Amino acid sequence: MKFSEVDEATWEELQPYFDTCLIPYTGLTGKENPMQATAALERLRDFMDLVEIPFKGRIITYPAFQYGLQQDLSLFNEICKHVKSTGFKHVVVMSADSILREADLPDVDLILLRSEMNEQEGKELSTAVQAKIQNVWNSAH
């Protein structure tokens, strides 16, 4: 579910069921032409579908962190920390093109990188992504 689909009147009642926040990371540098930026966003959207569709009732997708030269991710980590302070137990970051390291994002519970799963496609990729999400939830109990 996207953040913009949440109804204020029912949020308090539904909040306990939505314990995981997904934050997309595009990693644009500003050097992309419009077609390259569009392609990057489409790759990220397709990768995110592997989480958003099967886990629609438990994960809320927040706005993407679009730009980042990947040299200093402290601002991005701070945002993830703040998201947790609003009541989310878990923060998952997904990126289709960027390389992110756990050491740079200590407040993130899971980083899913399409570039690290290049060998996998279709159902195999979907199963691997879903298993990683399930592992986060299972390790929290």
Image (tube, helix red, strand yellow):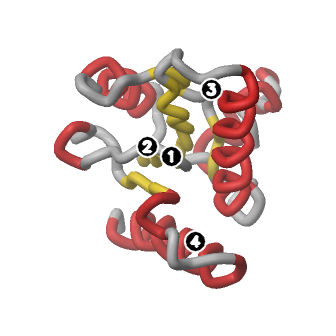
Give x and y (percent) for residue 77.
31, 29
The residue that mark 1 highlights is: 97
Numbered badge on residue 98: 2
Give x and y (percent) for residue 115.
46, 59
Mark sitting earlier along the chain (3/1): 3
Task: Report the front residue among 81 and 118.
Answer: 118
Mark sitting earlier along the chain (3/2): 3
Q: CA distance from mark 1 to mark 2?
A: 4 Å
- Relative to 57, say whether 38 is above or below: above
Task: Determine whether, in the image, residue 68 is placed left or right of residue 32.
Answer: left
Secondary structure of the residue carrying tag 1 is loop
Mark sitting earlier along the chain (4/3): 3
Residue type of the residue flagged with mark 1: Asp
| Quadrant for the N terminus in the image | top right
Give x and y (percent) for residue 11.
71, 31
Count the labels in the image. 4
Name the residue: 56% across, 78% down. 120
The local crowd at label 3, few if under 14, some if 14 to 19, many if 20 or more residues have their Cα within 10 Å, is few
The residue that mark 3 highlights is: 63
Mark sitting earlier along the chain (2/4): 2
Residue type of the residue flagged with mark 4: Gln
